[in-house]
Image (cartoon, rainbow, N blue to C red):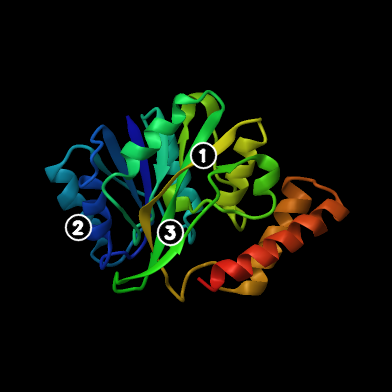
Amino acid sequence: MISIVTPCYNAGRSISDTIESVLAQTYTDWEMLIIDDCSNDSSSDIIRQYAARDSRIKYICTDQPSGSPTLPRNIGIENARGEYIAFLDSDDLWLPTKLEHQLALFQEDNVAIAYTNYEKIDVRGQRRGRRVIAPPTVTYRQLLKGNVMGCLTVMYEVGKVGDVRFKKIGHEDYALWLSILKKGYIARNTNTVEALYRVSRNSLSSNKLTVLKWQWNIYVNEEHTGLIPALWYFINYACRALVKRMK
């Protein structure tokens, strides 16, 4: 089974499309854990309606708004029953073969993470060919140069990774991927576009200065790379980020 973790806050306009993209998967042995961070729009009603129709969809609500996807994602991980865990935010979409294509990559013993390429869409869901193509394989050292794995594309194998959680820091997904690959595993790309990322000006990572501080914190305080290596990785990160924003 694959456990799909979906944090949700006031996503009434998009959550139906997100759920439908999971229902359309060619691989059907999954559960979808949607963690509502105390939405005050129609999100909870929509999710409950889907959960009533399909037992694979689970509705969970936080006790109070957390203000970030970190707590909802961790709640999802804690309640997951699957051998694999995947992540999908409440305004993003998967293409039908996403899960099927990723599962095949875990046959290699050293692969703990499978990810895919993805395409950017606008707030209305329009596709304009803005594809983000990631490397075919990523190691820990390579990942230090910058995150090439979109969270909406990542799936990891619980038996290899163990019991892991997101930290409440900026770029929490990137920090988690690093902690996994640091154990000696690699991440493998399906080399296909399998997800659609909705670009929003109000995203948490839209402030460039804040994002740079997050990245530096991971190098210095989380990975303890040392000052000189941190500078080297930071320069690589900044260059890649600039290219990525131009796509």
Please indicate whether residue 30 sits to the left or right of residue 118 in the image. left
Observer-nearest of 38 and 50:
50
Give the vertical position of 150 relative to 235 (above or below).
Answer: above
Q: Decide: marks 1, 3 in contact (CB < 8 A)?
A: no
* Residue projecting furthest to the bottom: 201
- Which is more N-terminal, label 2 or label 3? 2
Say few, some or many: other residues with alpha carbon within 10 Å of mark 1 (under 14 / 14 to 19 / 20 or more).
many
Q: Residue at x 31, y 66 (%)?
A: 40
The picture places residue 6, in percent across and down from the top left corner, at 36, 50
Label 3: few (<14), some or many (≥20) within 10 Å? some
Quadrant (top left, top right, bottom left, bottom right) of the N terminus: top left
Which of label 3 and label 2 is nearer to you? 2
> Going by the image, does 3 lie left or right of 116?
left
In percent of width and height, residue 199 lies at: 42, 70
Which is in the foreground here, disc 1 or disc 2? 1
Residue 16 relative to residue 230: left or right:
left
For image coordinates 68% across by 66% down, the residue present is: 239
The residue that label 1 is drawn on is 188
Q: Residue furthest left?
A: 53
Q: Is residue 78 left or right of residue 146?
A: left
In the rendered image, the vertical position of residue 3 relative to residue 215, given as above or below: above
- Give the label on residue 65, or none: 3
Give the mark nearer the N terminus: 1 vs 3.
Answer: 3
Q: CA distance from mark 1 to mark 3?
A: 35 Å
Residue nearer the viewer, 142 or 63? 142
The picture places residue 61, in percent across and down from the top left corner, at: 34, 50
Which disc number belongs to residue 46? Answer: 2
Residue 204: in sight, yes or no? yes
Residues 8 and 214: in front is: 214
Q: Amino acid at mark 2?
A: Ile
